[in-house]
């Protein structure tokens, strides 16, 4: 399961549709706070896919909180403003908005495959 977090409804719908058509199970949340409540009550996702800039807490904060609960689960950031967060994103994977369905699927597939390989 992929946990998709973005405050923009259209982005969530687009990404969810693309990923579900590819065969992924997707749960989505409109905020970092909502996503954190979800991960406390559901099994660990394969991937946290989160926007960086959101009202309330941002995706970087969410990833830090998320990793306290699920340290081995990878995070893929999505943002139109990633250049504003260069220091915080050092070493992280970020897909720049707007992205195509093919770019989204490739990024998700690559990060999930790398995570599986790292686990052995």
Image (cartoon, rainbow, N blue to C red):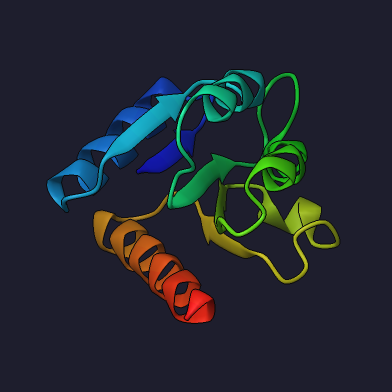
Residue 102, x across and y down, in percent? 26, 62
> Looking at the image, which is closer to me, 115 or 13?
115
Q: Is residue 118 left or right of residue 52?
A: left
| Nearer to us in this view, 34 or 93 | 34
Number of marks: 0
On screen, residue 69 versus residue 90, left or right, reads: left
Instruction: State the image coordinates of residue 108 (x, y, percent, origin top left).
Output: 38, 60
Question: Residue sitting at 46 percent across and 28 percent down?
Answer: 42
Residue at the far right in the pictured view: 87
- Name above or below for residue 74 compared with residue 120: above
Q: Residue at x 39, y 33 (%)?
A: 11
The percent position of residue 120, horizontal first and vertical second, equals: 47, 81
Q: Residue at x 59, y 22 (%)?
A: 31
Location of the N terminus (image quadrant)? top left
Judge from the rendering whether residue 93 lies leftward or rightward of residue 10; answer left or right: right
Residue 71: which quarter of the image?
bottom right
Q: Nearer the viewer, residue 117 or 98?
A: 117
Q: Position of residue 61 (x, y in %)?
A: 77, 38
């Amino acid at each position: 399961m992929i946990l998709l977090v973005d405050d923009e409804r259209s982005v969530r719908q687009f990404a969810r549709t693309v990923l579900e058509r590819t065969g992924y199970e997707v749960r989505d949340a409109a905020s970092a706070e909502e996503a954190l409540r979800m991960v406390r009550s559901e099994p660990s996702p394969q991937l946290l896919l989160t926007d960086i800039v959101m009202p309330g807490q941002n995706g970087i904060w969410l990833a830090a909180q998320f990793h306290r609960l699920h340290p081995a689960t990878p995070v893929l950031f999505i943002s139109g403003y990633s250049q504003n967060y260069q220091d915080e994103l050092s070493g992280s994977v970020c897909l720049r908005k707007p992205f195509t369905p093919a770019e989204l699927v490739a990024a998700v597939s690559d990060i999930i495959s790398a995570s599986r390989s790292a686990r052995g």
